[in-house]
Structure formats: structure tokens, C-alpha cells
Amino acid sequence: MQTMPLLEVRDLKTHFFLDEGTVRAVDGVSFDIRSGVVLGVVGESGCGKSVLARSIMRIVRPPGRTIEGRITYDRGMRRGAAGDFVDLAQMPIDGSEIRDIRGSEITMIFQEPMVSFSPVHTIGFQIIEGILQHETDISKDEARNRAVEILRRVGIPNPESRIDQYPFSLSGGMRQRCMIAMALASDPNLLIADEPTTALDVTTQAQILELMAELQREFGMAMMLITHNLGVVAQMAEEVIVMYLGKIVEWTDIDTLFDDPKHPYTAELLKSIPRLRREGQAERLTAIAGSVPSPYVRPSGCPFHPRCPQAVAGLCDVREPELVQVGERHVVSCLLYSDGASNGAAEMETE
Ligand SMILES: Nc1ncnc2c1ncn2[C@@H]1O[C@H](COP(=O)(O)OP(=O)(O)OP(=O)(O)O)[C@@H](O)[C@H]1O
Ligand SMILES: [Mg+2]
């Protein structure tokens, strides 16, 4: 029997209730994150990647609310005794249990580190506070030593003095390294990284990604890596979920995603990345036809049908597809694969 995943998300819905209408930002999402595995999350802007991450952390605030679904998390894995399940979706957003988990067992790195750091405190103060908040049996000096060590590990030169600097006095790359240090100081089970490098220049991006890959292996933690960049996913992730308008359209391992994508949306996304030809020329970048529709007006049937090159009139604009299993660890939500197929998420669950 396959071991239970670290995190099991089922039928998760997080909506924003606005005067203009309801935004179904995350709309019935199911997937797993296995212990120690890097899961990539891709999809165009506005498809719900960040809201999904925030839903797992339970930091979505009104007018947004998680209204349905389960986020089963195995707290036992931390203590080496898997099987102590809690449902994060049932926890009050600022209750003590979620605060205990958030920032120690499950941590998050954001695109722009300045939003995560307080400008009025030193980097060290913030990392040390984080450590002390979750570990009561450790002295301030020990926490400071730990913070210095972790800053050294993420490549901050002279961490003994840098620890007393304020976030604004560091470069973007250094701030992001400090953000990673803060997220790792508690040795988390799961690190959620939401576009961790997009605010950086290309060289710094590559260095930070390399550092994250190294640390992920060293710490053995699971990682949910959100990115627009399929190249980054190819380099870092073992499994991938592809999102479109609040739904998962495909979930599979990285090789299958590139070699045998099933969903037309995934195929179009892959076409949109430039590939180097043998002679070294980049192929023309093809953008996906059309744009993501207004979040208030969801298309009928399959949400991708208005832009889908393979849409079948009278079917795709009418019926809503379900996730179906099309291979080992490969599920897809597309009517082209629906006939006679069984429910994908349920199959992956009982495998
Ligand atoms: N605080 C909010 N209030 C209202 N709507 C929101 C809020 N946050 C997100 N949304 C809406 O939820 C949907 C999903 O947004 P989300 O930020 O998760 O997209 P994303 O996939 O992370 O996009 P990007 O790649 O641009 O970061 C969008 O339609 C967005 O406008
Ligand atoms: Mg986002």
C-alpha cells in the first residue's frame, strides 16, 4: 500500500465574495503532496495559484473564504510517526493550532520579500522571533546562533553582522535569501514558494533556484513551487499540477507532462515556451489564443473550451469535465478523455 501523503487536498473551494460578483478563485481542487517531493504548480496569471497556497496556509481573509473541502495534513510525520491527521480547512484562520503549524511545519516564501519582512525590525530579530515562537525550550542566544548558521547556509556573507541589518539595506537577492532562511529556520515539512524568483534579475534567479534545490534535498522537505516558468518546473519538480480558472486540469509527473501532455491547455502552455532548435535558434514563441476570461463570468461546460483548439461543439460548452485517470499518476480534466473513465482523484487516492 502506498504511504499516505503529507498533504491531501480534496474538493477545495476558496471564493471571494465581492459587490461585483463572486470570484471562484479555487474551485474544487484535489491533489496530494507527498513527503519530500517537489510539486510544481503552473498556470496563467489569475488561475488561482496564490489563492490555493494561501488557502493551505489559512491566510485568506474576507471577502475571501474557504467554503468547502478538506486539507488533510499529517502532523505525525514531524515526529517520525506518520498518521496524526488534521484538517487545516476546518481550523479557524487565526486559531492556535493553525498558528502553531504555520511558520514552523508549513512555511511560505513570497514573490516580494519586502512584504514578508517588517521594515522596522532587523532581519535577525525576525528570524529569531520565528524560532522562539515555535520552540519554547531554546534560549535567545541559541536562537541567535541558529539564525546566524541558517543565514550562512543560504549564502549570506558575514552573517554575524548582517543579522543586525534592516531588510531595506539588503539587495533583492540577499533579501530573498533571508526570506528562505526565515522559512527554513524551523525545519519545515512543507515549504510553499510562490513565484520566489520573479522579482529578481536572471542571474540571481538562477542562483536562488539552485540554492532552493540544494536546500530542499538537504532538509528533505516537501515543496510546493508556484511558477509561471515551465523551465523552472522542469528543473526542480517531480510532479506538476496545471491550473486553469481555479481548477486543476492536469496532474502528473514531470516527464509525462513534457512527453505526453493530455490536456489541450497543457499542450498549449508547452508550445508557448521557446525551445532551442539543434542549430541553436529559438523557436517562435506562440502565445495561447485568447485570454483568461473575466473572473466573474465563468464559461459554461469546460472553462477552457472558448480557447481550446480541440473543443467539440455541443459537448465541451455544455458538460463540465471531471478529473479522470489516464495513466499511473496521471489525471486530467478534459471531456476528450472522459468516456468510460473513472474518477481520477479517487483512483490516485486508493492506489
Ligand atoms: N484579495 C482578493 N480579492 C478579490 N479577488 C481576489 C483576491 N485575491 C485574488 N483574487 C482573485 O482570485 C483569482 C485568482 O488569483 P490568484 O492571485 O490566485 O492568481 P495567480 O494564479 O496566483 O496569478 P499570478 O500568476 O498573476 O500570481 C483572480 O481572479 C484574482 O483576481
Ligand atoms: Mg500568484
Image (cartoon, rainbow, N blue to C red):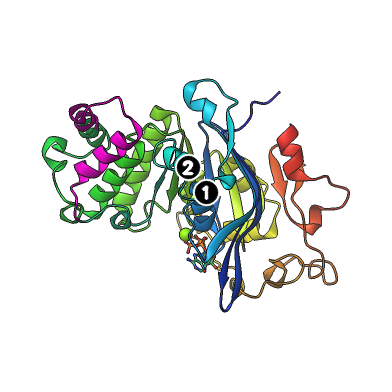
Seen from the viewer's position, the closer of residues 223 and 315 is: 223
Residue position marked by numbered label 1 in the rendering: 92
- Asked if the stretch drawn in magenta spans residue 121, the answer is yes
* Label 2 CA crowd tier, 10 Å (few <14, some 14–19, many 20+): many
Seen from the viewer's position, the closer of residues 318 and 25 is: 25
Residue plotted at (34% across, 47% down): 206
Residue position marked by numbered label 2 in the rendering: 98
Instruction: Tell me, yes or no, whether the two marked residues, 2 and 1, touch with CB atoms within 8 Å.
Output: yes
Relative horizontal placement of residue 224, taking residue 218 as reference (left or right): right
Q: Is residue 33 visible?
A: no
What is the tally of numbered marks visible in this picture? 2
Residue 70 is tagged as: none
Which structural element holds mark 1?
Answer: loop
Secondary structure mainly formed by the magenta segment:
helix
- What range is drawn magenta here? 120-146
Residue 191 x/y as whole percent: 44, 40
Which structural element holds mark 2?
Answer: helix
Q: What is the three-letter code of the residue carrying label 2? A: Ile
- Asked if the stretch drawn in magenta spans residue 21, the answer is no
Work out which residue is located at the far bottom of the displayed protein and give it.
20
Q: Is residue 115 visible?
A: yes
Residue plotted at (25% across, 54% down): 118
Residue 276 x/y as whole percent: 48, 54
The answer to which of marks 2 and 1 sits earlier in the sequence is 1
Quarter occupied by the N terminus? top right
Q: What is the three-letter code of the residue carrying label 1? A: Pro
Quarter occupied by the C terminus? top right
Relative horizontal placement of residue 329, taking residue 91 as reference (left or right): right
